[in-house]
Amino acid sequence: AKGQVDGVIVKSPLLGDFKACASAELVAAIMRVPHVWLIGRPDGASGDVCTVDDDTGAQVAADYLHHRGHRRIGYLHPRPGQTRSESLKLSFSLHAHRLGLSVQAFENPLIEPIRWPLPAITDPAVLLPLLDRWAALAPEVRPTAMVVSADSIAVQLYAALRLRGLQVGRDVSVLSFNHEKPLVAGLTPELTTIDIRAETIGRRAVERLLWRIDHPDD
């Protein structure tokens, strides 16, 4: 507000259009200074972005599950329309089908209109309807592994499974993305999660912002 910032690194909810979901004042404040979007750039936004190689991560996940003997995979997706989760779902489905795996999405309907800030998913009850849809399937078609796009969702999935008397590793396997050690340290059994190299992404975002400040018109 006082014009004392040379540049910003911005983390967005990645759900909804930037100019429709954020206030006009916030949009103007971000756009008037050099900026780098972290992890992903929201729809309707411009500027540099330093993000995850979702396609490679999805390939690693599909190869790993195939190697472990899974042939039916579920993709648990509580927030459809979320840019990164949609990207992961598409990439994972393509790599899974290449390996002959079947993929079934368990997702909520998209709720409009979307307004920021978005509440975090901190209640396992949000996942129970999706989990119940999975459990209602016949054993011969029910996915044996569930993929989620973030460790924060995996934590709630573990809790939702416990509420239904189910156990990770015995009743279904879980694979996640991000490798957030403090978040998943207490999970039993240990969560299988793809390391997105968050520290490297953060370092490169800083380097990119410094470059952008020096090259505003390039």
Image (cartoon, rainbow, N blue to C red):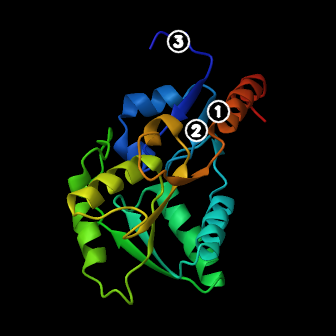
Relative to 108, say whether 137 is above or below.
below
Q: Which of the two labelled residues, at mark 2 and mark 3, occupies the earlier sequence position?
A: 3
- Give the label, 2 or 3, closer to the camera: 2
Disc 3 designates what residue?
A: 3
Relative to 150, say whether 50 is above or below.
above
| Closer to us: 4 or 77 | 77
Dot 2: few (<14), some (14–19), or many (≥20) neighbours within 10 Å? Answer: many
Q: CA distance from mark 2 to mark 1?
A: 8 Å
Check disc 2 and give the amino acid type: Leu
Tell me, yes or no, whether the two marked residues, 2 and 3, touch with CB atoms within 8 Å: no
Check disc 3 and give the amino acid type: Gly
Tell me, yes or no, whether the two marked residues, 2 and 1, touch with CB atoms within 8 Å: yes
Dot 1: few (<14), some (14–19), or many (≥20) neighbours within 10 Å? Answer: some
Residue at x-position 47% and y-position 9%: 2
Position of 76 with respect to 91 (left or right) is left
Picture disc at residue 38: 2
Relative to 112, say whether 198 is above or below.
above
Q: CA distance from mark 2 to mark 3?
A: 22 Å
